[in-house]
Amino acid sequence: MGATMQPLTNRSRVVSDKKMTLMERIYLPAIVGGLSITIRHFFRKKPTIQYPEQKRPIAEIYRGQHILKRDEKGRERCTACGLCAVACPAEAITMVAAERKPGEEHLYREEKYARIYEIDMLRCIFCGDCEEACPKEAIFLTDRIVQADYLRMPFVFGKDELVEPMDPTKRVDVSKRQTPDVITFKQENRYAHNR
Amino acid sequence: MIATAIFLLVLFVITLSVAAYSTYGERKVAAFLQDRIGPNRAGPFGILQPLADGTKMFMKEDFVPLHANKKLFLLGPAIAMITALLTGVVIPWGGTLTVFGTTINLQGADPEIGILYVFAMVSIGVYGIMLGGWASNNKFALLGAVRAASQMVSYELGMGLSIVALVMLTGTLSLSGIVDYQIAHGWGIIQQPLGFLLFLVCAFAETNRAPFDMPECETELVGGYHTEFSSMRLGFYLFAEYTNMFISSAVITTLYFGGYHVPGLASLGLDPNVAAIIGVAAMFAKTFFFIFFFMWVRWSVPRFRFDQLMNLGWKKLIPLGILNILLTGGIHYLFNH
């Protein structure tokens, strides 16, 4: 098997233990060569991105921190069906369902809603399967980056962090995730209940 | 007398601040050589980083191992630091300044045997490392200390031999005398190129800097002689290393690069005070270049193996040093007779 192996790069060198020439044994030419390489790097432009002030450009459809959408009347779209939790390969989603009481119609769109909805951001692999599984257009991934923290507990995001604000001006735009392809796909007949 | 005391105080402060900012400089140089930016969060461009580092050092737990020899353990960093600071006294940082009719010699003391004094201080400095390493009662620290001692002994020979040739040339052991000779006859690097090379290599070994930083070789010895040290005691060891680097750079400048001499400055006919200040600035510029060079080499050249180090010291540098003495003597005999 190994006999026909191709070198991966053109930079491979044959190692040999031949006697070193005088120039090699003096060692100083090699040191000068090394110094000249490093000094060239000294004046090179640095590729560092200074994170909090400066951000790496990310794709428009970047899969970052999740959002639980409200509908146009400000009602939570999530009906606690649990499909996202089932779809989740990392088992990061936990939810407890509850029944909507009379008088709560302005809060929850369906008769059943998620009383507790938690995503463990340390388990989440940001694959977007939950978004794809959701029949109610309730959960989306956004281009927001989950902030770092010193402890583990703050990474279990509850509804307080996941549900989007009621205030229409503070809604989170997910239209980038709903590309024409996605919308066409979701307009298929079997998703008719969701329109 | 008071003038000298003030000068020494200023020198003390300058040495400490140069050592402190060398730590910052080292991190910046290392970063730039590796295509990084380096510390830039503490103050603009990170210039307050040494203060942050110092504060951190002081806040750390001051730990003495249970089975350590406590007295020697406490003495080690102090010796390292004191000897590092003492060496700067004999280096001529400039000519003379005249302020309000008082003449200030910009050299703390000018003993006839200035260069030997430097050697003596450097040799005592290794006791700081040896005592600290031995007192730690830790095998890695001990190995580091032993390495430091053997390395110091080996390379002092090479260094001494390269100095002998220079002393033969200048006819004096006084550092200001050597500078005066260079002002009159040209810089030492031109007259002693081989001697300079030997001295430079030995200076790297004497200051325990890469590629000869065997005493604190992390890959083999955890932290070497300062494995067991924490808090500001560790800080003192690191500080002493940077002070030594500063002093070594100053000694190299003094011996081979004309010290405070600026070629052509005397012919401009400037005010003596202005000329002296330009001289001091030149001295520091040359010294800082060598500090940069020390860092540049550290982040370019891999560490030697210990047997390679000994091989280089005993079988290469010492014969070359003797050859250099013979050459110097021969040339001196041919041209001056």
Image (tube, rainbow, N blue to C red):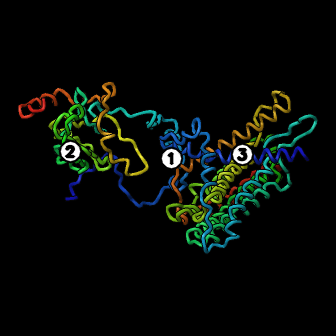
Judged from this view, the residue extending furthest toward the bottom is B67
Q: Quadrant of residue B112?
A: bottom right
Front-most of A173 and A19?
A173
Judged from this view, the residue extending furthest toward the left is A189
Q: Label 2 amino acid? A: Ala
Q: Who's the residue at 67% across and 71% down the image?
A: B70
Read off the residue under disc 1. A34
Read off the residue under disc 3. B253
Q: Quadrant of residue B120?
A: bottom right
Image coords of residue A119 (percent x, y): 28, 46
Do we see residue B194 in this rendering?
no
Q: Is residue A83 left or right of residue A45?
A: left
| Helix, strand or loop status at disc 3 | helix
Q: Which mark is residue A98?
A: 2
Callout 3 crowding tier (Cα within 10 Å): few <14, some 14–19, many ≥20: many
| Helix, strand or loop status at disc 1 | helix
The numbered mark, 2 or 1, whose residue comes first in the sequence reads: 1
User: Residues under labels 3 and 2: Cα distance?
Assistant: 81 Å
Callout 1 crowding tier (Cα within 10 Å): few <14, some 14–19, many ≥20: some
Front-most of B130 and A115?
A115
| Helix, strand or loop status at disc 2 | strand
Q: Label 3 amino acid? A: Thr
Judged from this view, the residue extending furthest toward the right is B101
Image coords of residue B154 (percent x, y): 65, 65
